[in-house]
Image (cartoon, grey):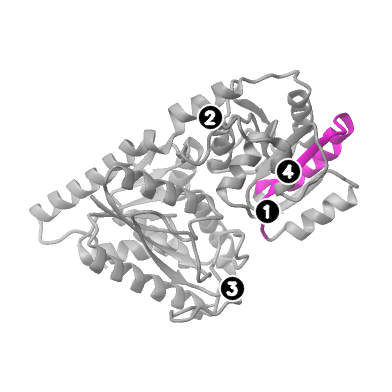
Amino acid sequence: MRVLFVNHFPLTGSGSGVYTANLAKGLVRRENEVMIVFPENRAEYEQYDKISLQPVFFTNQEKIEGVQQSNMNIPCFTTHPRSTFNFRDMTEEQRREYDEMFYKAISQAIREFKPDVVHAQHIWTLAGIAARCCRENNIPMVATCHGTDIMGILDERKRGENWGTAWAREAVEYASSIVTISKDSNQLLEEVLPATKGKTKWIRNGVDMSVFSKDDDIRKKEVLQSLGIEEDYEKIVSFVGKLTDFKGVDVLIRAASMYEKDNENVLTLIAGDGELREQLEGQVESLGLRNVKFLGNRPQETLKKIYNIADCSCVPSRREPFGLVAIEAMACGAPVVATNEGGLPDFVTEDVGRLVDVEDAEGLANMVTKILKGEIAFDRSAISDKMRRLYSQDALMSEFIASYTQAIQQSKNHRDSSDGFGIDD
């Protein structure tokens, strides 16, 4: 099978990027062929064995020689480690340019790669452009709703706009099926876009276990020194994710001001970047916190080490469509303290972590303190084994392949019974 992926974001630094890369690697391991169309703003970017990459180049104050490059940075729903430029801030001219760039790139990929099926990420602008390209070339399409796309639609409605939502409707109408990443996301999508009812299919997010796993050879002191931290700490609390409002990092920092009082030798590591970094660093300073360290965006191999040395990992999101970082942490054996909302309650159960209320800094601090003091104990090997059994990307590949096969068969049946496949303009 030949599968073409299309994504709004680079393949690192965002949940959907990691999701796409993980799926692509899983398909290749099963001897399928894969190409990915995605935005990029660097001349050098991650490469993957046996996966064809077709970047669409934007700018981040770096001139990339020999390629056609947009003058704008990569548009985001919220933020990305390499861009804080939001879709809502685009001019009409920039929107037209964005549409044209990806229409051209996707059409070219379809002509040259000749995919059996296209898998588009995010039910918003790009999925609609992909749907139009697929329709024109009689190629079936599957789409995934990641949650931030719903945020984009709802934000547009508040502002009385329709650009991305119009593309979303085209994607929904054309797609054979729409994968959702959690029960909560599935329900919300059907409420926001009722036309998705009957097309949605909940498939759990998977983690690349070749990267994220429990490793007893990882040493805390060596990891901290590699991060530029020379002091010794008895306990480690970690956070990994974008530094944006819905991730709730400010709540974690308020919690840290409480659990530091009961645990003087605890270090809080915040890995990630985004539009709120300066504000969050100011919050740490104003609270007089000595043991909260901002690490910036880090590669997956470093995140694996951070998870392995963490006594617990926190996901304090105000709304989290799924929470892949929680699965990554638990794959490395770290128990997770997460908010009781979105997709997190689907898998953060009492054998692997604890749930607290959104905005409840005191509740978060109390739960972290109980774990650090051993009042709540976890079997780290059992946590890792459970994630491998239920959330390994390889374990979930059959569900995605079944969706692709169904889309291809529906396309064939439609072509056999009519003059064409698709929808009217």
Question: 140 or 91: which is nearer to us?
Answer: 140
Amino acid on which disc 4 is placed: Leu
> Are the residues tagged 3 and 1 within 8 Å (C-beta)?
no
Q: Which residue is drawn at 53% across and 34% down?
A: 213
Q: Is residue 424 visible?
A: no
Q: Which amino acid does label 1 sit on?
A: Leu
Question: Which label sits on residue 60?
Answer: 3
Between 125 and 271, the one lying in front of the other is 271
Q: Distance between the residues labelled 3 and 1?
A: 19 Å
Asked if the magenta segment contains residue 311, the reply would be: no
Residue under label 2, please give it. 347
Q: Position of residue 157 (x, y in %)?
A: 54, 60
Q: Name the residue under label 4.
A: 224
Q: Earlier in the sequence, mark 3 or mark 1?
A: 3
- Pointer 1: what residue? 243
Residue 368 appears in view? yes
The mark total stands at 4
Mark 3 and mark 4 in contact (Cβ < 8 Å)?
Answer: no
Sequence-first tag of 4 and 1: 4
Magenta stretch bounds = 247-274
In this image, 191 relative to 355: left or right? left
Between disc 2 and disc 1, whose residue precedes? 1
Residue 221 vertical position relative to residue 228 in the rendered view, above or below: above
